[in-house]
Amino acid sequence: MASLRDIKTKITSTKKTSQITKAMQMVDAAKLNRAELRAKGFNPYMEKIQEVVASIALGSSSAEHPMLNSREVKRTGYLVITSDRGLAGAFNSSVLRAVYQTIESRHQSKDEYAIIVIGKIGTEFFRKRNMNVISQLTGIGDDISFSSIQDIARKTVEMYGDGTFDELNMFYNHYISAISQEVTQKKLLPLSDLATSSKLMSYEFEPSEEAILDVLLPQYAESLIYGALLDSKASEHASRMTAMKNATDNANDLIHEYTLSYNRARQAAITQEITEIVGGAAALE
């Protein structure tokens, strides 16, 4: 049996750990509220730009653009969104496992795919496995602005245009609720899924439909990336908040068990002392 001092040390260290995880849980709960508001606040913009793009691209038989047309897939691009920090439960491992399994099942060599990764965890994961990472972004922080990811979003869209890859799939964690996040795979390029539930609007174009699409389609694709990042950030905070709550609960359970063990050991020590005293007194009689 462990000594009273050892058990007391375990209780003290576990209480300190519990205080840390509880504080982290509260911090991420506050961050989750802000991230959720930012993600929801971006939806009206996305809905409107999708409506405009769909009205132009689908409402006219003469509208043509390379980003709308599928081509023979010789090389596939994967945009993977992870976090810069761990301690977030299965947030990173679930999305990385989905990407890794997809690449392993679909491709025979590194020449058949290219990876663009956002987040330190994902970057280290693919680098350690010597996979074909052609671009990465880390350190974007919690309050994501469009300007902080605009370069990698623009370069990603441009790489589709210059033929670096022939299709682009995006993997990220979709935020459902504070206790539920879902790994999502979305085909980002070509933009083949522009259908909206709303009625297509009629617009007059100046100078031409093609000129407008040249501007709007890259902005729309970049906005999809930004929207997925906001969605993923809310999922990250929710996942970390849940993980820290579970860690706090586990620490409290351990404290309870250690306290019981401490009380039993202390009671046994007291009983042993009483027995020795009584035995000594009996020997003197």
Image (tube, helix red, strand yellow):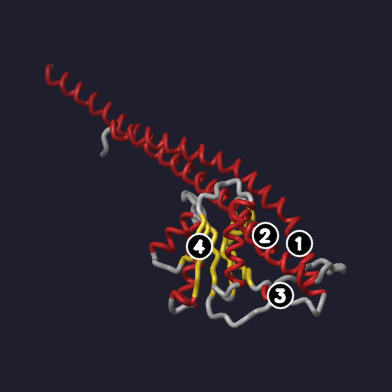
> Can see residue 143?
yes
Q: Which residue is mark 4?
A: 135
At mark 4, the secondary structure is strand
Q: Are marks 2 and 4 in contact (CB under 8 Å)?
A: no
User: Looking at the image, is mark 2 or mark 4 nearer the viewer?
Assistant: 4
Q: Residue at x 58, y 65 (%)?
A: 156
Q: Which residue is mark 3?
A: 65
Q: Amino acid at mark 3?
A: His
Q: CA distance from mark 2 to mark 4?
A: 18 Å
Q: Are marks 2 and 1 in contact (CB under 8 Å)?
A: yes
Tag of residue 223: 2
Q: Which residue is mark 1?
A: 49
Sort mark 2 into few (<14), some (14-19) or many (20+) by Cα contacts within 10 Å: many
Q: CA distance from mark 1 to mark 4?
A: 27 Å
Q: CA distance from mark 1 to mark 3?
A: 17 Å
Q: Are marks 1 and 3 in contact (CB under 8 Å)?
A: no
Sort mark 3 into few (<14), some (14-19) or many (20+) by Cα contacts within 10 Å: some
Sort mark 4 into few (<14), some (14-19) or many (20+) by Cα contacts within 10 Å: some
* Relative vertical location of residue 275 with respect to residue 96 in this rendering, above or below: above
Q: Residue furthest left?
A: 284
Point out the image quarter for the N terminus: top left
